Amino acid sequence: AQSVTQPDIHITVSEGASLELRCNYSYGATPYLFWYVQSPGQGLQLLLKYFSGDTLVQGIKGFEAEFKRSQSSFNLRKPSVHWSDAAEYFCAVVPILTGGGNKLTFGTGTQLKVEL
Amino acid sequence: GAGVSQSPSNKVTEKGKDVELRCDPISGHTALYWYRQSLGQGLEFLIYFQGNSAPDKSGLPSDRFSAERTGGSVSTLTIQRTQQEDSAVYLCASSPSDTQYFGPGTRLTVL
């Protein structure tokens, strides 16, 4: 079945440490890939996206993600985490050629806690 | 510029009552999406509009849920005879093409 998996429900890192959030997908063809962030009581903010081309994608707030076709993964990284990065992070996909718009399928999210 | 706005931000209603949730998309965005975010189900797609038409309603959980979009702009999601399981945050997103931009959501609580 088609799915998006975020294996880590909760992650805690120290401020200044590096961060990697995992995302794996299961689709026949490489879908469009997105990372969104949600702060408490807020909507979803787009961090970055991958459609094709360079497999290392730069986003806002110093985040980047790397698409690895062989691993069906699209992991989110940040070299040095700031306390303001504490939030919930969602990986999402749009299967290509669905014929019904670009509806997003989301992973279950990873809650990031930053220790000062 | 102005982003996606949703109203009300919070809605508390009694079981069995009807509710209407409103979404104002970013001007010029032709596509509009509704999603629901709940503790048990995560983020789920509800319905997609292209212009005023809804080519994909596959995510609406029951016939108590309906939505419309007028003038290629504002959209209203209506839930009739609300049930406690309808309690969730309802998110709207608009899109000019491949990327969706989300509003802050409406938190619906059904007592």
Image (cartoon, grey):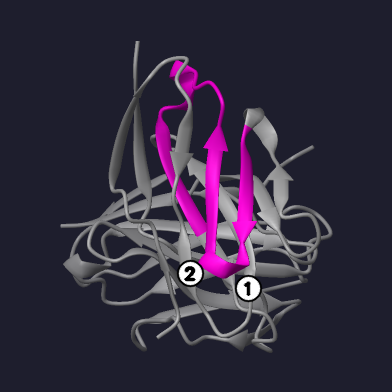
Where is mark 2, residue-wise? Answer: A25
Q: Do the residues at discs 1 and 2 belong to one chain?
A: yes
From this view, report whether residue B30 is shown above or below residue B9: below
Mark 1 touching mark 2, by CB under 8 A? yes
Q: Residue at x 70, y 73 (%)?
A: B70
From this view, report whether residue A23 is shown above or below residue B10: below
Which of the labelled discs sits on residue B75, or is there none? none
Q: Quadrant of the N terminus of chain A?
A: bottom left
Q: Is residue B13 left or right of residue B27?
A: left
Instruction: Please tell me which residue lies in front, A51 or A87.
Output: A51
Q: Residue at x 21, y 72 (%)?
A: B16
Q: Chain of mark 2?
A: A
Residue B38, horizontal then vertical, whole percent: 30, 59
Residue type at mark 2 is Tyr
Q: Quadrant of the C terminus of chain A?
A: top left
- Residue closest to the far right: B28
Which of the labelled discs sits on residue A31, or is there none? 1
From this view, report whether residue A96 is shown above or below residue B85: below
The crowding category of the residue bearing disc 2, from other C-alpha atoms within 10 Å (few below 14, some 14 to 19, many at least 20), is many
> Which span is picked out in magenta?
A63-91
Which secondary structure lies at badge 2?
strand
Q: Quadrant of residue A60?
A: top right
From this view, report whether residue B103 is shown above or below residue A86: below
Residue B67, horizontal then vertical, whole percent: 53, 77
The crowding category of the residue bearing disc 1, from other C-alpha atoms within 10 Å (few below 14, some 14 to 19, many at least 20), is some
Which secondary structure lies at badge 1?
loop
- The reply to whether residue B97 is in sight is yes
